[in-house]
Amino acid sequence: MFAAKAGAKKVLGVDQSEILYQAMDIIRLNKLEDIIILIKGKIEEVHLPVEKVDVIISEWMGYFLLFESMLDSVLYAKNKYLAKGGSVYPDICTISLVAVSDANKHADRIAFWDDVYGFNMSCMKKAVIPEAVVEVLDPKTLISDPDSIKHIDCHTTSVSDLEFSSDFTLKITKTSLCTAIAGYFDIYFEKNCRNRVLFSTGPQSTTTHWKQTVFLLEKPFSVKAGKKEK
């Protein structure tokens, strides 16, 4: 509806959830049914009533940007339907890592297994460590500058680019005990935008439902301010 109000001649919405039917009612209530067409299904399976579109807008982001995200579908739509010179929004995404020191949380989730009501269950640590924790971090627990490990331009990236490994270096800002590495992402609307629009899911920013993704360390280690850790 925002696109229609902004002057789009035709707006096509694709979604496979049942909420689409409520969206249809809302569109009719706002007398936009002549502009907006909703299609139920997956973008990979439906047939759009046009050959090309000028703009693709999607809230596809998952936890840590790519976990259970729908970017694959957006890239499919881009490759099949986006007209030459068209735009995808949001278009720029970055993934960053930062060091964390929170001994209490580490004790609750990892050291806890050393003594569970008098029993040694430390073997459980190997099952817990690989599981990322999605939570809101206290900015006071951050002990490094962030390091960006991935830059995605939705206009040029491909599905194969989404599986990657990356080295990273964190400049420590506080002498402490590093207990975890946390990840978050930033989103930008840049192409042809006179006013830059962005939002961050970082711990220093307003909390979003994506929160932050925390990777607990099996063995925390001491770090010194000013030192770079790889």
Image (cartoon, rainbow, N blue to C red):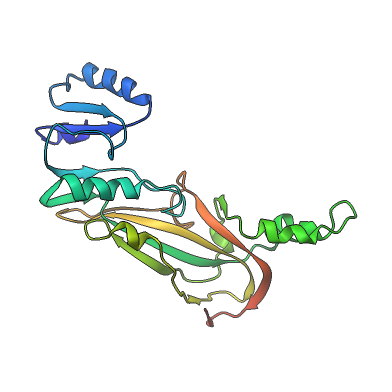
From the top left corner, tell me how far across and down residue 223 is, in percent: 61, 78
Depth check: 80 or 1 in front?
80
From the top left corner, tell me how far across and down residue 27 is, in percent: 23, 22
Depth check: 124 or 11 in front?
124
Residue lying furthest right: 118
Name the residue: 53% across, 61% down. 182
Quadrant hosting residue 166: bottom left
Residue lying furthest bottom: 227
In this view, 36 is above or below 31: below
Depth check: 151 or 39 in front?
39
Name the residue: 53% across, 59% down. 139
From the top left corner, tell me how far across and down residue 65 is, in percent: 41, 53
Left-right relation of 70 to 204: left
Left-right relation of 208 to 215: left
Name the residue: 17% across, 23% down. 32
Name the residue: 11% across, 39% down. 51
Number of marks: 0
Residue lying furthest front: 45
In this view, 65 is above or below 140: above
From the top left corner, tell me how far across and down residue 203 is, in percent: 49, 56
**Quadrant position of the N terminus in the picture:** top left
Quadrant hosting residue 120: bottom right
